[in-house]
Amino acid sequence: MTRLEARDLSFAYQRGFPVLQDVTLSIDEGEVLFVLGANGSGKTTLLDCLAGLRQPQSGDVLIDGEAIDRLSAAERAKRIGLVPQMHEPVFEYTVGDVVLMGRAPHLGLFARPGRADREAVERALEAVGLRDLRTRIYTEISGGERQLALIARGLAQGAACLLMDEPAAHLDPRYQAEVFQAVSRLSADGFSFVVTSHQPNSALLYADRAAFLVEGQLSDDGRPSEAITSESLEAAYGMEFELVKDASGSRAILPLVRRN
Amino acid sequence: MIDRRGRSAWMLLFVVPVLFLVALLIGRFGLRIGDAFRALFGVGEVDDVVRALVLRVRLPRALAAVCIGANLAVVGAAFQGLFRNPLVDSRILGVSSGAAFGAALALLLSAGTFGLQASAFLFALVAVGFVLLIGLRFGTAPLILVVGGILVSAFFNALLGLVKYVADPLSSLPAITYWLLGGLSDARWATVLPLLGITVAGLAFFLAIRWRLNVLTLGENEAASLGVRVSGLRTAVLCVGTLMIASSVAVGGIIGWIGLVVPHLARAWVGPDHGRLLPTALGLGAVTLLILDGVARTALPSEIPLGVLTGLFGAPAFLLLLLRFLRSRGETR
C-alpha cells in the first residue's frame, strides 16, 4: 500500500530560482527510499515539503491517500516524523525528555504528558535499543545514539513514515551501520523511510529504492543496483566513479581521483 | 552529570509563606508576630499605627516583592527557552528602557507615585510594542526580536538621556537616578493590585503551557514538525511575558539580574524540563526578592537600592554557576 506520495512538487524560495521541479515520488509501507544528491541539490527542502513544513508552489503531498495540507499540524505530526540532522539542543535535556517531546501532537496546548505518554517513550526507546539511556543527558551521548533517540522520538509521535535528513553525515562507520540497521528492522515492521544521503554506498547496502535529486529534479528512481550507476553518479556529483563488485555480488562505489 | 529525576522544589511552597511573614515583621520598626497576625486578620486589639504599617506599607510591599521576583524569574526562564539562548533575560525586548523613559518623564513633570508607575508601565509596553511590530513585519525569529530590542532600547535610552539633560539637577535628576536603581519603597495598593492581577493571570498562563515550552526550545522547524503552531504560541508567550515584566518594572524600577540568574539557579536545581523548571523559578524568584528586599530595608539606616543589591548578589551567583558549569565540562569531557 502506498504510504507517502508526492505529485509534481515544485518549490522555490525566490521566484525564478526553483529548488524543486516537478518532483514525483511514492513510497510503500515498509519501504526505504534513499534520495541521493550533491550538497545544495534540494534534499532538505524536499523533506521539509514532504513533512508539510514548507508549502510547495505547486503539486501535492499525500499521506495514506490524504492531502497533507488538509490535515492539522498535529494530525500531520502523528503520521509523518522528521528526523533532523545532528543537532545540539541548548539545554541539557535527558534522552527521555527529548523522546517525550514526540508526544506533543497527542497533547493539547495546556496538557502535560501522562503515564500513557511515558509508556510510549519506553516502547520507542526499546525499539531502537536505547532503553538504558533514558535518564542520560542527551547532549552527552554519542552522535549515533542521538540519531537513534531522534528515530525513537518519531516513533513516539506515532508516525509510520519517517523522513531522515543526512542521518549518517557525522557518524563513524559503526554507528552508521547501527542507525541503518535500526532503519531496516523498523521497515520490516512496516515503517516507511525517506532518507537523504551523500553516500551512495549506504544506499547500496540499506535502500529498497534509490533516486537522485539533481538540480531539483528527481531521476533514476529504482532498485539501488539499477539506479546507482557510474552515469547517474557522475550526473549527480559532477565527477567520475567506479562501481566494483566482489564475487558474492556485493557492490561498492569508489570515487575516481587522479593522483599526481 | 547528576541525575535530576528525583529532585523537586516543593519545599519552596513552605519557604515562600514563611519569608513573606518575616517580611511583614522586619524593618525599621520591628513587630511581634502576634501583632502582625492581629493586624492582618483584623482580630483583637492592635495599635492603629501598627495596623496601618502592616496593611498599607508592608503587606503591599511584600506582595510586590513576591510578584516581581516570580515574574522576572518565570519570564526570564521562558524567554531563555524561547530565544534558545541561556544569556537572555526577561528584559531582552527593551522593556526596561521604555519604563525608564516613562518614569523619568513622569518625574520631570512631577506626576506623583501613581502617575509615575502608570507612565513607566505604558512606555514599557510602547517600547516592546515597537519590537513586536518589527517582528510582525519581518518575522518573530529570535534574531530579529533581539535586534529589534537593541534598536528600541537605544532609542529610548537616548530619550532618557534627553530627559535627564533637561531635568532639574537638584530635584528631579536625583529622583530619576534613584528610581533607575530600583526599589520597592513606592509599592502601594493602587499599583500593587493591578500588578497582582496581571501576575496571577500571567503565571497561570505560563504554568499551563509549561511543558510545551520544551518543544519551542528545539527551534522553529523542529517544533513545527512535532505539530506545534510555533508563531502563535511564541506570540502569546511574548505578549503575556511583556505584560508581566512591564507591570513589575513599573512598580519596582529597574531590577536587574533576577531574570537572568534565578532561571539558571532553578535549572541547576531541577534540570531544564520546563514542567519542573517554571514552578521552581517562580518560587526561587519570590524567595530571592523577598530576601533581598528585606536586606535593602534593614541592613543600613537608610534603604539600599534594590538594583544595587541584585547586582551584588547576581554577579557572584552567576560566576559560581559558570564555574560549576565549566567544572562539569572538565569532568565529563
Image (cartoon, coloured by chain):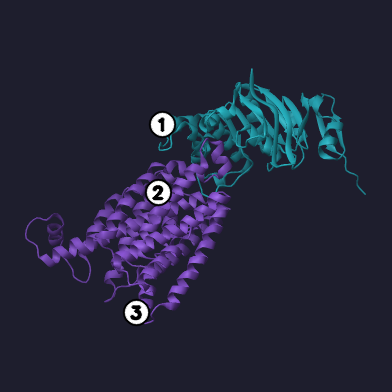
Chain colours: A cyan, B purple
The circle drawn on residue B171 is 3
Residue found 52% across the figure and 43% down from its top: B231
Q: Chain of mark 3?
A: B
Instruction: Out of A174 and A35, give the one closest to the viewer.
Output: A35
Instruction: Out of A225 and B55, give the one closest to the viewer.
Output: B55
Residue found 44% across the figure and 55% down from its top: B76
Label 3, label 2: how far apart the Cα atoms are: 42 Å
Within 10 angstroms of label 2, few (less than 14), some, or many (20 or more) residues? many
The quadrant where residue B306 appears? bottom left
Within 10 angstroms of label 1, few (less than 14), some, or many (20 or more) residues? few
Q: Where in the figure is residue A204, as x and y percent of width and height?
A: 76, 29
Q: Where in the figure is residue A85, as x and y percent of width and height?
A: 64, 41
Which amino acid, mark 1?
Arg
Marks 1/3 same chain? no
Which amino acid, mark 3?
Ser
- State which mark lies toward you, 1 or 3: 3
Disc on the earlier residue, 3 or 2: 3
Q: Is A166 drawn above or below residue B100 in the view shown?
A: above
Which amino acid, mark 2?
Leu
Which type of secondary structure does the marked residue at label 3 adopt? Answer: loop
Which type of secondary structure does the marked residue at label 2 adopt? Answer: helix
**Which residue is under mark 2?**
B278
Residue found 58% across the figure and 32% down from its top: A81
